[in-house]
Image (cartoon, grey):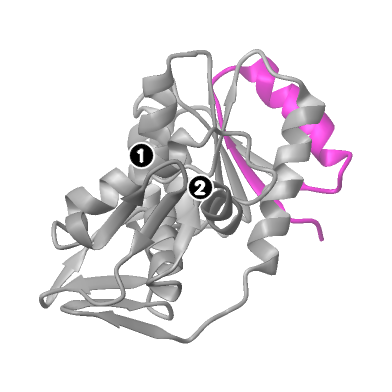
Amino acid sequence: MGKRILIIEDDKDIVVLLKHYLEKETFVLEDASDGFSGLKKAKAENFNLIILDIMLPEMGGLEVCKELRGDPKTATVPIIMLTAKTEETDKIVGLELGADDYVTKPFSPKELVARVKALLRRTERRPEKEKTYHYGKLTLDLSKHEVVFNNKRIELTSKEFDLLECLLRSKGRVLSRDYLMDEVWGYDYYGGMRTVDVHIRRLREKIPALSEAIQTVKNLGYKLKENP
């Protein structure tokens, strides 16, 4: 059986279009026409990927994304957001909440299928790790997908978590934005380098102790100090 994809979209024509192209690739499709029922379905069943519209009745796509990332069952399910909006701020908010990719309407169905495949490939090749990182009073547990600072759990989006793990794994080394994009978002990601900066800023805000520990290296990228 093909991988299961949930489409949360209130435009029936778009749902029919996506089903037509994705089912030809042997994906199994389910859909929901509003945010509340989509969130309920996503939590009740197991999906390999979610395509989520940002403008939805009952509950907006951004709120749905936030709820999905806050639930351990759906925290790591890849999410592609759809929107008719083109403002940079909408993209940034979606990415900050943990969306993996972002597609602006109108879009090419073939391009969206390519992004779905690329995102699933990245998810599949991630190795299962049973490792814990310690950095001063900070602990990142990969097996529990949990970050604790000073005995208090810190809520991070999936991308913030992956970015922090990458920094901890390579502490003391300068990591370019290109490298971080590849490690956290993958070569096939269509967003810009601004994405890395946004997520670094969010890490510094959520864990103030990292504000100085994560150093900006001008024209290159970022480095986590060897010692906290």
Quadrant of the image containing the N terminus: bottom right
Please name whichever residue, 100 or 211, is drawn nearer the observer in this view of the structure.
211
Tell me which corner region of the image, top left, top right, bottom left or bottom right, holds residue 104.
top right
Tell me residue 72's x, y (percent). Answer: 38, 65
* Marks 1 and 2 in Cβ contact (< 8 Å): no
Tell me residue 218's x, y (percent). Answer: 38, 43
Assess whether residue 113 is covered by the magenta stretch: no
Give left or right: position of 4 versus 176: right
Q: Is residue 57 visible?
A: no
Which of the two labelled residues, at mark 1 and mark 2, occupies the earlier sequence position?
A: 2
Tell me residue 62's x, y (percent). Answer: 37, 32
Give left or right: position of 163 versus 207: right
Residue range highlighted in magenta: 1-27
Tell me: residue 147, above or below residue 189.
below
Q: Secondary structure at mark 1?
A: helix
* Residue at 69 percent of width and 54 percent of height: 120
Tell me which corner region of the image, top left, top right, bottom left or bottom right, holds residue 137.
bottom left
Q: Secondary structure at mark 2?
A: helix
Kindly identify which residue carries mark 1: 198
* Residue at 24 percent of width and 77 percent of height: 227
Instruction: Categorize mark 2 by other alpha carbons within 10 Å: few (<14), some (14-19), many (20+).
Output: some
Tell me: residue 211, above or below residue 79.
below
Give left or right: position of 1 versus 34: right
Quadrant of the image containing the C terminus: bottom left
User: Which amino acid does the dot numbered 1 rest on?
Assistant: Val
User: Which amino acid does the dot numbered 2 rest on?
Assistant: Arg
Tell me: residue 15, above or below residue 143.
above
Q: Nearer the viewer, mark 1 or mark 2?
A: 2
* Residue at 85 percent of width and 48 percent of height: 26
Instruction: Categorize mark 1 by other alpha carbons within 10 Å: few (<14), some (14-19), many (20+).
Output: some
Residue extending furthest toward the right:
24
Kindly identify which residue carries mark 2: 177
